[in-house]
Image (tube, rainbow, N blue to C red):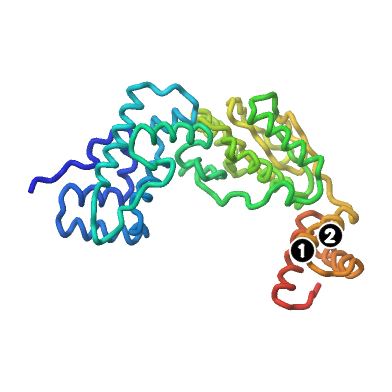
Amino acid sequence: MASENYLENLVVLTGIMDDPLIAAFAAYRNGKTAARKTAFLRELFLHKAETNFSEYVAEKVIRDENAFSRACAAGDDISPFLKSAYIADLAEIGRALEFESTDFDVGKPPVPLKTWDDKAANLLYGYYQSSGYGRFLNQSEFRYDAARGLVPVPPCAYTLADLKGYEREKAEIYDDLENFVKKLPCSHMLLYGESGTGRSSSVRAAANAFASQKLRLVELPREQLSELPRLTELLAELPLRFLVLIESLDGQTRIPTCSAENVLLAATGSDLIDGFGVAIPFRAAGREEYLSIVRELVKEHKLKISAEELVSLADRWAEKHGLSPRSARLLSGYLYACKEKGKEYKI
């Protein structure tokens, strides 16, 4: 029996064929031999996609970086030729998934790919335009590596409200980022002061607040600062806005020029450094501010500790760890862990 021709005529969505499971499926569909079936099922079970294979394929289609998804994210007009080719690719994928097997469940694709036609293409246009595309869809933070490019890293796990103290400083960071996202006048930011005061944490939390508005954070290691022009050139070509975070600079550092309209710099340092329009000081916390942060965090953890005992614990903790928001967070975490384990506080 002559083999069919499945997934071999893709024009826009060719990137999904780099996926080993989809490639194995296409090989199996185009020549149903026992060896190809075995290879496909092996990949299927490894990827845990046997209960809804269509959902797996849909996820790869949605996250594919191609001419259509990129143009949608940029808000560009889509030519009728590109849209027609994209819809034809969706139809080709849908045709390949018209398949029944007792070995696995083909299933149904989820929204916004409920169908494999022009309706799906229209839904994806709005999705990409509002949320970004490709690797940037559900990934908000990256680290730049000269050899590997943008490498995904675990996203910020807290909000600005989770960070206690320094309300004026946090508000200034948020305001500058809001202007950047809304394409209003804004400036590169320098957050200077002592370690442990929450400079980097505040930047990450503020950036996270705008992730739904297509802002992505990219960490540039200090030792790769010379790569900033190359990174800027890379980001300037992408249809999103990027906050580049550089940590632990000193007063001798010279910042390479960064003039891309969609790139904003945020740096932390102990000294004032030229090249930043906004300089936000993070002063060391005093005892009362430190205790205030400790009280708020202990309250959030619902720990029942008398005011007198808490002050005593916090003071003893500060002797070893200093007076800072970071020290306060470490203390509250320690106290919470002791409570959960039923252990006494030993400071």
Q: Assign the C terminus to one quadrant of the image.
A: bottom right
Left or right: residue 92 versus residue 238 is left
- Residue 246 is at least partly visible in this image: no
Crowd rating for badge 2 (residues with CA inside 10 Å; few <14, some 14–19, many 20+): many
Q: Which mark is residue 343?
A: none
Q: Which residue is mark 1?
A: 332
Earlier-in-chain disc, 1 versus 2: 2
Figure disc tally: 2
Q: Are marks 1 and 2 in contact (CB under 8 Å)?
A: no
Q: Of all residues shown, which one is farthest toward the bottom?
A: 343
Q: Is residue 106 above or below residue 211?
A: below
Q: Position of residue 157 (x, y in %)?
A: 63, 52
Q: Amino acid at mark 2?
A: Arg
Which residue is pictured at 27% across the width and 36% down the height?
10
Left or right: residue 270 versus residue 217 is right
In-front residue for pair 297/190: 297
Instruction: Give the secondary structure at mark 1.
Output: helix
In-front residue for pair 336/110: 110
In-front residue for pair 303/310: 303
State which quadrant residue 15 falls in. top left
Q: Amino acid at mark 1?
A: Ser
Q: Which residue is mark 2?
A: 295
Which residue is pictured at 79% across the width and 62% down the height?
298
Crowd rating for badge 1 (residues with CA inside 10 Å; few <14, some 14–19, many 20+): many
